[in-house]
Amino acid sequence: GEELMNKIVSLCKRRGFVYQGSEIYGGLANTWDYGPLGVELKRNVKEAWWKRVVRERDDVVGLDSAILMHPKTWEASGHLASFNDALIDCKVCKSRFRADHLIEEALEMDVEGKSEEEMTKIIKENEIKCPTCGNADWTDARAFNLMFKTFQGVVEDQSNVVYLRPETAQGIFVNFKNVVDTCRVKLPFGIAQIGKAFRNEITPGNFIFRTREFEQMELEFFVRPGEDEEWFEYWREFAMNWFIELGVSSERLKFYDHPKEKLSHYSKATTDLIFHFPFGWEELWGIANRTDFDLSAHIEHSGKKLTYYDPQTKEHIVPYVIEPSLGVDRAMLAFLVDAYSEDEVEGQTRVYLDFHPELAPIKVAVLPLTKKDSLKELAMKIYNRLKKLYNAEYDEGGSIGKRYRRQDEIGTPYCITVDFESLDDQMVTVRDRNTLEQDRIAIDQVEQYLRDKLGF
Ligand code: ATP
C-alpha cells in the first residue's frame, strides 16, 4: 500500500500533476498545488460531475455561492456549536489524536454526536492503547472548532468575525428560496454546487485525501417528505455508477451504511461510498437523508419562510433533502489510484495511467518521428487541427520511446506519430496507450478515428 502511494505521489510531482504547496519556502504542511496536468485532470473530474448531475438532468440546477457567509449561517447549521473535533493526548508520548478516530479504529464504533466527556469515558473504560507508544494513559478530550476564522473589514473586532465555509451545502440552503422564486423548479429538484471548503482538520494527511483546504461537489436534492427514502436509494446507486461509468473498478468500491442507532441527530440515513485506497477503505462520497433539518433550522434562525408551495396538495411545505457530497481532490486521488498501472514491455517495466478518456488530461499527442522540418510541418498541421477539438499536445523532444513513456505516464490515450512515409502516403500511426497496438490511418481520417475511439 505504502509503496503504491509513494509511486503515485512521485509520479504526480515528476509529471506536473501535484506539487507541494509553497515548496520554495520549505512547504506549508498539507497544502498541495495542482500543476499543469493536475489542473486539467481536476477540471475534467468536475466537468464529469457537473455534466451528469446538472447539465444532463432536467431536475437539477447549479449555483456558485460565496465562501464567506453571514455568521448566523453557522449558528443555524450547527457548525458553531458542534462542528468540533475532540482532541485527546497521550500522557506518555504526547501524541495527539482525534478522539472519534481513536474509538472508531479501536472499537469499530461510530461516535458522531457524542460529547467530549462521553468519548473520554469510552476511551478510558475500554483502555484503548495509544497507536504510537502502546500505553493507555490519556488526558481528557477537549473540543476544538474546525472552522477557519478570519475578519471581514480592516478592524479585527469580534463583531467582524467571519468563517471560511466548512462545506458548500449551506450556500445552497440559504439560496433555496431564491431559486424557488426565480427558476421555475418543481419538486423533486436539486441544487448543485462545486467549490472550496475549509476545515482546520487535526489529522490531515495521505497526500490530497484529507487537507484543510479542499473542494467539494455537493448536491442538495429536495423531495416531498415520504418520497425521501426512494430518492436516497436513487442517489446512493447514482454515486456508485458515476465512478464505474468513469472506469473505476467495482472491486475498489463499496457501500458502508451507517447503522441506524449511530446516526447523527439530523440524519435519517447515511451511506458512504467507500474506496479501497492504498491506505485502506475510506470514505469517498457521503450520501445522507437530512430530512427537513437544514431548511427548518434556517427558517428558525432567519425568520424567513423557506417553503415550497406544492400545487399537488395546495400546501406550503418544507421539503426533505437528500445530500450526496463528494470531495473533488479525494475523487481525483481515487481516479489516480485506480488508473495507476504497470506492465512489462520489452523486458522493462512500463508505467501508465489508465484514465477514462473523459478524464485524461491530454487526449492525444502528436509526435514527429524526428525534428526534421518536413515532419515537423506536417505534425504541426495535424496538431493545430486537433487542438481545436481536444486538449492535445505536440512533442518533438527526445527519442520517440521516451516521448511514448511520458504520454503513458500522464495517461494520454492516443499518440499520433508522423514518420517519413507519412510524407508520401499521407498516413500516420496511431498508438493505443493500453494495448500498444498501432493503426496506420489516413491523415484525413484522424478526427473520425479519434471520435470513435474516445467516444466524443
Ligand atoms: P471525514 O469523516 O473523513 O472527516 P466527513 O464525514 O466529515 O469526512 P463530509 O462532511 O461528509 O465528510 O464531507 C463530504 C465529502 O467531502 C467527503 O466524503 C469527502 O469526499 C470530502 N471531504 C471532507 N473533508 C475533507 C478533507 N478534509 N479533505 C478532502 N476532502 C474532504
Image: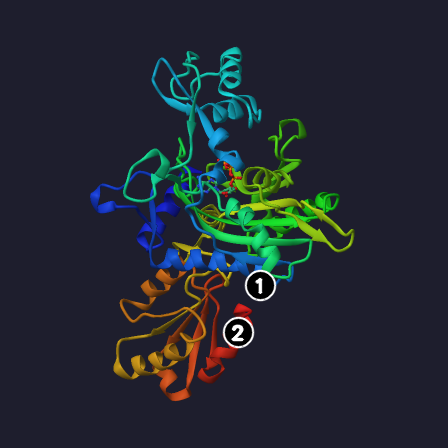
Mark 1 and mark 2 in contact (Cβ < 8 Å)?
Answer: no
Residue at image mark 2: 451
- The residue shown at (36%, 13%) is 91
> Residue pushed farthest front?
303
- Residue 340 can be seen in this image: yes
Camera-nearest label, 2 or 1: 1
Residue 171 vs residue 420: left or right?
right
Disc 1 packing (10 Å; few <14; some 14–19; many ≥20): some
Real-space CA distance between mark 2 and mark 1, rounded to the nearest whole angstrom: 21 Å
x%, y% of residue 431? 45, 69
Residue 355 vs residue 318: left or right?
left
Of residues 178 and 293, which is closer to you in this image?
178
- The amino acid type found where label 2 is placed reads Arg
The image quadrant that residue 70 belongs to is top left
Q: In this picture, is 124 found above or below 318? A: above
- Marked residue nearer the N-terminal end (2 or 1): 1
Q: Helix or strand or loop: what does disc 1 sit on?
A: helix
> Residue pushed farthest right?
313
Q: In this picture, is 455 found above or below 448? A: above
Q: In this picture, is 135 found above or below 82? A: above
Residue 356 vs residue 207: left or right?
right
Which color mode does the image show?
Answer: rainbow
The image quadrant that residue 49 belongs to is bottom right
x%, y% of residue 166? 45, 40
The numbered disc on residue 55 is 1
- The amino acid type found where label 1 is placed reads Arg
